[in-house]
Image (spheres, rainbow, N blue to C red):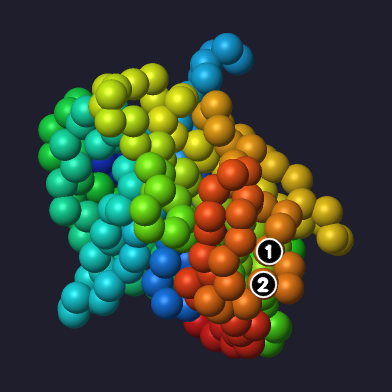
Amino acid sequence: MSVTQRLSIQWGQSPSSEPTDTLVITSPEGHFVDVRVLKDHEPHDKFPIEWAFCGRTEQVGDGKVNYSHDIDSRQLQGESVDPDVGSVETLANGDEREEGEMTNPATGKVESYVEVWRPLDPNKEDRTPLPKSLVSDINVSVLATVDGQKMNGRVVRVGRWIQGILEFDDDNDKAGNIVDRLAIVRAKATGDIWSKEVSIGSHSDKVPVSDLEGRVLGDTFIYGGIEWAVIEHRRSRTDSIY
């Protein structure tokens, strides 16, 4: 279970940099939503996303983690996506170093990479680094769209942070405009008020943000005309020691 912010990425022997505002929110059962917003984009750009995807993590041994991609913005834009497997280690200061291979969007080639991630305190809305020792109760909810609808969505809440992705399946227009086919949301809570940091896509108002309180595992409900189900819910106690 975590809320992590990427600090940098290094491709091959190139200098490390951070061209995006990237957060990943992951539940105790491994459901995650990863949203990477380009820092340098035109104000009129309706889809300033380098990459956004969701799925589930799986430990595959030797410190390696496999990340499934159930919804992937690059696939929807016609790109092929290679298997996503990285080796992760925790550094002395609590940051996480991930290395592996994947397609560099700048070159279109598979290259080695090193990413540095910083775990955040899920109960703070100001991106506070996770303390070395933290004992805290954290609200966790994961939503998925109910089968049988022409859309596929996932929402993950950990503490005061939520990210969600909603894909619309248009049988008549598989190569339709990405802003009509994909909705992406990132929100945080200040007190009882949820505010969106990221809201992208024509249907971003259909991604639940503020309607999760009181819902428990197995509940279904309608939001924005779409039926959602609670597939994971708990109030977890975290104890971070690194």
Q: How far from the left and from the top, in percent, is residue 226?
A: 54, 48
Element marked by disc 1: loop
The residue under label 2 is: 215
Q: How far from the left and from the top, in percent, is residue 130?
A: 62, 70
How many numbered discs?
2
* Residue in front for this viewpoint, 237 or 239: 237
Q: How far from the left and from the top, in percent, is residue 211?
A: 71, 58
Q: Residue at x 21, y 60 (%)?
A: 85
Q: Is residue 92 visible?
A: no
Q: Residue at x 73, y 73 (%)?
A: 214
The three-letter amino acid code for the residue at tag 1 is: Leu
Q: Residue at x 67, y 77 (%)?
A: 138
* Residue in front for this viewpoint, 163 or 213: 213
Is 173 placed left or right of 205 in the picture? left
Callout 1 crowding tier (Cα within 10 Å): few <14, some 14–19, many ≥20:
some
- Give me the C-alpha separation between circle 2 and circle 1: 6 Å
Above or below — where is 67 with respect to 215? above
Is 236 placed left or right of 160 in the picture? left
Element marked by disc 2: loop
Asked if disc 2 and disc 1 are in contact, CB closer than 8 Å, the reply is yes
Above or below — where is 172 with respect to 90? above
Callout 2 crowding tier (Cα within 10 Å): few <14, some 14–19, many ≥20:
some
The residue under label 1 is: 212
Q: Residue at x 75, y 45 (%)?
A: 195
